[in-house]
Structure formats: structure tokens, C-alpha cells
Amino acid sequence: MDCENQVRMLRKLQEMEFVAVELNLYLDNHPCDEDAINDYNCAVERIKELRKEYEAEFGPLLNFGMGGFSKEPWQWAKGPWPWEL
């Protein structure tokens, strides 16, 4: 298992999710800012890409049908968990 690569990929995903949350909060107060809307949409698209890359290599990030498909053996219980990194 390549833990360093897993941590790196997870951090990138977390950073982009942070960007999306911050832009979301900004847009709550500035709903007509077209640049911010474009930045938000780009962040969401990048999150989708990063999740897909992460899940292809390390398994699903979410359970109960919310994440990607699992390879064999069952990957959901495979660590480390995000809070263990």
C-alpha cells in the first residue's frame, strides 16, 4: 500500500473541498458574482475528478451506495481512515 500517495491524494481532495465550501459561503452573500460562481463550478468539477482518481486507487470514500464500486476484497473497511492520516 502506498500510504504517502494516499495521504497526498486525500489532502488534495480536502483542500479542494475547503475551496468549494468557502466559495459557497461567499456566494450566499454575493449570489451575482459570476467569477465566484465560475470558480465554484470549477472547484466542484475538480472535486469529482479527485474523488474518482482516489476511489479508483484506494476504494470508496463513502458507503451505502454513495461512493464508487468496491474491488475485492471489500475496500470500505480498509484503512487508514481519513481521520487517521
Image (cartoon, rainbow, N blue to C red):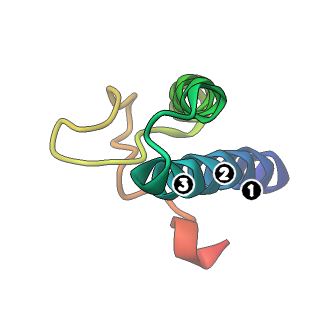
Q: Which residue is mark 2?
A: 10
Image quadrant assignment for residue 70: top left
Circles 1 and 2: CB distance less than 8 Å?
A: yes
Work out how far the residue at label 3 is from the one at label 2, CA to CA, in angstroms. 24 Å
Q: Which residue is mark 3?
A: 26
- Residue at the far left in the pictured view: 64
Work out how far the residue at label 3 is from the one at label 1, CA to CA, in angstroms. 28 Å
Task: Please determine whether, in this image, residue 57 is positioned above or below residue 7.
Answer: above
Task: Please determine whether, in this image, residue 32 is positioned above or below residue 2.
Answer: above
Direction from residue 6 to residue 46 in the image, left or right? left
Instruction: Give the x, y percent position of residue 78.
Output: 46, 56
Q: Residues within 10 Å of mark 2 (few under 14, many from 20)?
A: some
Towards the viewer: 31 or 48: 31
Q: Which residue is mark 1?
A: 7
Q: What's the residue type where badge 1 is placed?
A: Val
Earlier sequence position, callout 3 versus callout 2: 2
Direction from residue 1 to residue 72 in the image, left or right? left
Q: Which element carries disc 3, helix, strand or loop?
A: helix
* Residue lying at 32% horizontally and 36% vertically, measured from the top left: 67
Towards the viewer: 55 or 36: 36
Instruction: Give the x, y percent position of residue 56.
Output: 54, 25
* Residue lying at 64% horizontally and 50% vertically, measured from the top left: 19
Q: What's the residue type where badge 3 is placed?
A: Tyr
* Residue lying at 66% horizontally and 51% vertically, measured from the top left: 10
Q: What's the residue type where badge 2 is placed?
A: Leu
Direction from residue 12 to residue 33 in the image, left or right? left
Instruction: Give the x, y percent position of residue 22.
Output: 58, 57
